[in-house]
Amino acid sequence: QVQLVVPGGGLVQPGGSLRLSCAGSGIAFSANAMAWYRQAPGKEREWVATISMGGWTNYGDSVKGRFTISRDSAKNTVYLQMNSLKPEDTAVYYCRSGNPLYWGQGTQVTVSS
């Protein structure tokens, strides 16, 4: 059984930082492309970042220069480091594998004073 487990996000002030993790079981992250998505209230789900099997990364325009996706193959975990957070980053964040496609359960990140 494939599971993508994302521990709780959190509440952070504008300008702060937060790191999300996505721990996999039943699937090897090193053999799959991985991605982070997010969905803000009242908006469609948005692609945030992708890391390929070879370690290449890409980011959505809204997070370039602020967010970093990385992978620890030994721990079978993908991370999303979020810096310089803005209120508009508030969303439910999802971890996703690519082909085969599996979604994590999502975790709430709230950026507010």
Image (cartoon, rainbow, N blue to C red):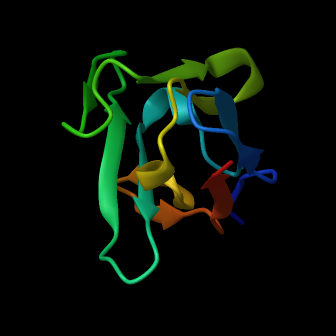
* Placement of 12 over or under 66, stated as above or below: below
Quadrant that contains the N terminus: bottom right
Q: Nearer the viewer, residue 99 or 22?
A: 22
Q: Quadrant of residue 17?
A: top right
* Placement of 21 over or under 69, stated as above or below: below
- The reply to whether residue 89 is in sight is yes
- The reply to whether residue 77 is in sight is no
Which percent across, then down, holds residue 59? Answer: 26, 32
Residue 55 shown left or right of residue 61 in the figure: right
Which percent across, then down, holds residue 31? Answer: 46, 32
Numbered circles on residues, count: 0
Q: Residue at x 44, y 69 (%)?
A: 40
Q: Nearer the viewer, residue 21 or 56?
A: 21
Which percent across, then down, holds residue 29? Answer: 55, 35
Residue 35 shown left or right of residue 95 in the figure: left
- Residue lying at the far front in this picture: please name it: 113
Q: Residue at x 32, y 28 (%)?
A: 52
- Residue lying at the far left in this picture: please name it: 61
Residue 70 shown left or right of residue 60 in the figure: right
* Placement of 38 over or under 48, stated as above or below: below
* Placement of 38 over or under 24, stated as above or below: below
Residue 67 shown left or right of residue 95 in the figure: left
- Residue lying at the far bottom in this picture: please name it: 42
Q: Nearer the viewer, residue 113 or 100?
A: 113
Q: Residue at x 37, y 15 (%)?
A: 55
Q: Nearer the viewer, residue 10 or 6?
A: 10
Which percent across, then down, holds residue 56? Answer: 28, 17
